[in-house]
Image (spheres, rainbow, N blue to C red):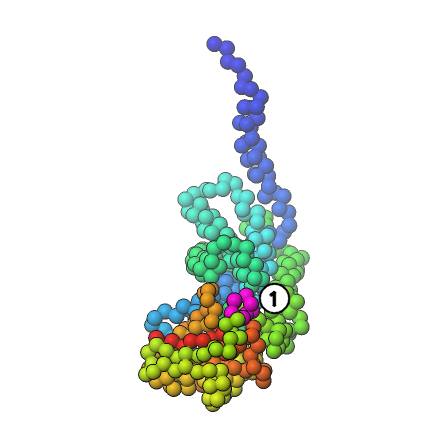
Amino acid sequence: MVRRPAPRALRRLLAAPAGLFAVLARLPGRFTSRLHDERVAAWLGLALGISFLSAFTTGLISHFMQHPPGWAQWPSRPVNLYRVTQGVHVIGGLATVPLLLAKLWTVYPKLWQWPPVRSAGHGARRVLVLVLVGGALFQFATGVLNIAYWYAFRFPFTTAHYWTAYIVIGALLIHAAYQWPKVRRTVLTRRTVTTRSTVMTGPQDAVERRAFLLTVAGASGVIAAVTAGEAFAPLARLAVLAPRRPGLGPQGLPVNKSAAAAGVTAAARDPGWRLTVTGRVRADLVLTLDGLRALPQHSARLPIACVEGWSAEADWRGVRLRDLLAMAGADDDAPVRVESLQRGGIYRTSRVDPPHRHDPLTLLALDLAGEPLTLDHGHPCRLIAPNRPGVMQTKWVHRLVVL
Ligand SMILES: Nc1nc2c(c(=O)[nH]1)N[C@H]1C(S)=C(S)[C@@H](COP(=O)(O)O)O[C@H]1N2
Ligand SMILES: [Mo]
């Protein structure tokens, strides 16, 4: 039998993997910048590790403030605690983006290691890095889209962001444990080591390395500077990247959800509006707006601290929540559910646990900045309490249910 040569197309097809291999194997040689360096990677890794741990901790604080586990209650003081933790979460998170990009660029040649898997352990470490990088990019992308109010994704942001955080931090801890010797060798000691050709040891290299790291730190600093004003009023004019700014909005305060968007305009304007205190009370209490105004009024200067990072202080005035609950004869230790006129949406109600319930600064506010609340800020009345996420400062309140 005569063996005919394989058709040309088939030969090409067979040659393709070999060709691809040759291209890939040559690629690392093209990463000529001497900044693809172990020490640069270690410095960036250390900064990223600290930043991720900070984001994780402040993220957990925000999550558990909104979904308190049965056995723990958040204190209502210090007044600005949540404002600070959430500012650190969002502004710190944004400032981390240049660090992550620089780190990915620095270690990029490693992604082209050939062969891709050298052993089971090596393969596992590479999968871990893939999870870490993928998870981190996901957290940044969804976080940035969320604070820009661009809900481009179909899944619920908070749930996805919360659960991915555990995956990222788990992968990070294992990665950090594995990389720690490198960090110690390169960052935490002064000794110069010469391993592969990518390690830079000369004085010129040190200058180059420092310049690169300073540039990255500078980029982080610039991002922080142009967003910090969304939470820190003295920098408000610099906050060109912030979606909300203190001082901008009706009564000098930004609005996240307007009355129109919440679909409450007619109900909130209805002269027949009543506030009802009900649930586990001695007797239901029903008050008109004039009735509420006839009760002792108290002032409080408190911030709205939105989960999206912006925050702004304002002067509120209204009735203490604890006075209303006492009038209705509510049980002292019971939590309270504050209900809005709003019909749908997850933020139409919020829960007030005893520490906030008893705090004299927790008000059912009627006035803001010396005038009755505008419709968008929650007319006829809204909850305002210290150390509490903005999403739990319920607007257009019409019912308090003692649980
Ligand atoms: N009923 C109701 N209350 C709400 C919201 C909402 O969507 N519905 N949004 C909350 C959010 S996310 C924030 S940050 C604050 C903002 O209050 P402000 O618009 O008066 O600044 O209101 C909160 N109260
Ligand atoms: Mo918010």
Please state the horizontal and vertical placement of residue 209, each as a whole percent of the image: 63, 58
Please state the horizontal and vertical placement of residue 116, each as a whole percent of the image: 49, 42
Is residue 294 one of those drawn in magenta? no
Where, quadrant-wise, is the C terminus in this rendering?
bottom left
Count of numbered marks: 1
Q: Is residue 319 above or below residue 160?
A: below
User: From this viewpoint, is residue 320 visible?
Assistant: yes
Please state the horizontal and vertical placement of residue 286, each as a whole percent of the image: 41, 81
Residue found at x 62% / y 73% = 249
User: From this viewpoint, is residue 392 visible?
Assistant: no
Image quadrant where residue 401 sits = bottom left
Q: Is residue 23 above or below residue 134?
A: above
| Type of amino acid at the residue the image marks with label 1 | Pro
User: Camera-side residue: 272 or 177?
Assistant: 272
Is residue 259 one of those drawn in magenta? yes
Bounds of the magenta span?
258-265
Say which residue label 1 marks: 243
User: Camera-side residue: 68 or 346?
Assistant: 346
Magenta: main secondary structure = helix
Residue found at x 50% / y 40% = 115
Residue found at x 47% / y 64% = 345
